[in-house]
Image: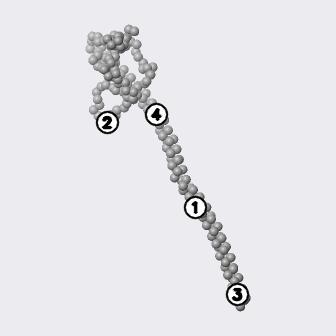
Amino acid sequence: MDQWTEDNSSELRMPEEIRSEADDEVRIVLPSSNYKELQTASRIPHGIVISGEASESDEEIDTHQTLPQSGSDFSINDSWDRSSAEPVEKDASREGSAALYNTIVSYQMYFSFISGCLKDCLYNFRLLHKKLREKNQTLRRNIVELVTQPYESASKEIHNISQQLIKSQLLVQELRNTIRRLTNDLFDMEDKME
């Protein structure tokens, strides 16, 4: 337990970590040429807080990505121990190259994290769009059935009524012919009786 120290409140903490009074924020001292730089990492489950210069352009879009939940998702360098977090006198060229190296490593980690998140987002969007298309097709089918069902039943009723009207018309024509024959027969009988 050489990396852990015990403070007055009998709480164990790493020398690189400084806990704030609010328990939801941890400040981590990053190894760089200027050891006064601090990076604040928030424990908000649905976002990343990155310290640095604020954007001056309205065109830049803020993106919030979730951090990996398991500890196995992060890789920790064993050579980064207590001695690397303590300030040491260095010459100007080593400080500049160390700062440049730390900046490059930070950007590489940041861009690899962002590219992984973008791949996950694209997969989730594809899956989301697929499910959305399926739901839209189901909804469309249900709406079409709901709207067309009364028209189909009404068209069937109209067809049945028109068939009955045709039968009635045929019966009326037959009845007219029968009545005409009867009147002709009656006129014939009347003529015979005179």
Q: Please report whichever mark, 3 or 2, sits nearer to the chain's N-terminal start.
A: 2
Q: Nearer the viewer, mark 2 or mark 4?
A: 4
The percent coordinates of residue 105 (x first, y second) are 36, 20
The CA span between labels 1 and 3 is 47 Å
For the C terminus, which image quadrant? Answer: bottom right
Instruction: State the separation of the CA atoms marked 2 and 4.
Output: 25 Å
Q: Residue at x 35, y 10 (%)?
A: 5
Q: Position of residue 126 (x, y in %)?
A: 47, 36
Q: Amino acid at mark 2?
A: Glu
**Residue 190 tag number:** 3
Q: Secondary structure at mark 4?
A: helix
Give whichever of 66, 33 is nearer the camera.
Answer: 66
Q: Is residue 42 left or right of residue 70?
A: left
In 3D space, how far apart are the residues under numbered discs 4 and 3 (Cα atoms)? 97 Å
Say which quadrant the N terminus sits in.
Answer: top left
Residue at image position (51%, 41%) is 134
Residue located farthest toward the bottom when viewing the structure as drawn: 194
Q: Is residue 189 above or below residue 131?
A: below
- SS state under label 2: loop
Residue 84 visible in the current orientation: no
Q: Nearer the viewer, mark 3 or mark 2?
A: 3
Dot label at residue 59:
2
Q: Identify residue type, mark 3.
A: Glu
Q: Amino acid at mark 4?
A: Asn
Residue hosting label 4 = 124
Indicate which disc residue 158 carries. Answer: 1
Check contact, mark 2 vs mark 1: CB within 8 A. Answer: no
User: Could you say where residue 164 lies in the image, as x and y percent from the top left?
Assistant: 62, 65
Which of the two labelled residues, at mark 2 and mark 4, occupies the earlier sequence position?
Answer: 2
Q: Quadrant of residue 160?
A: bottom right
Mark 1 or mark 3: name the one nearer the start of the chain: 1
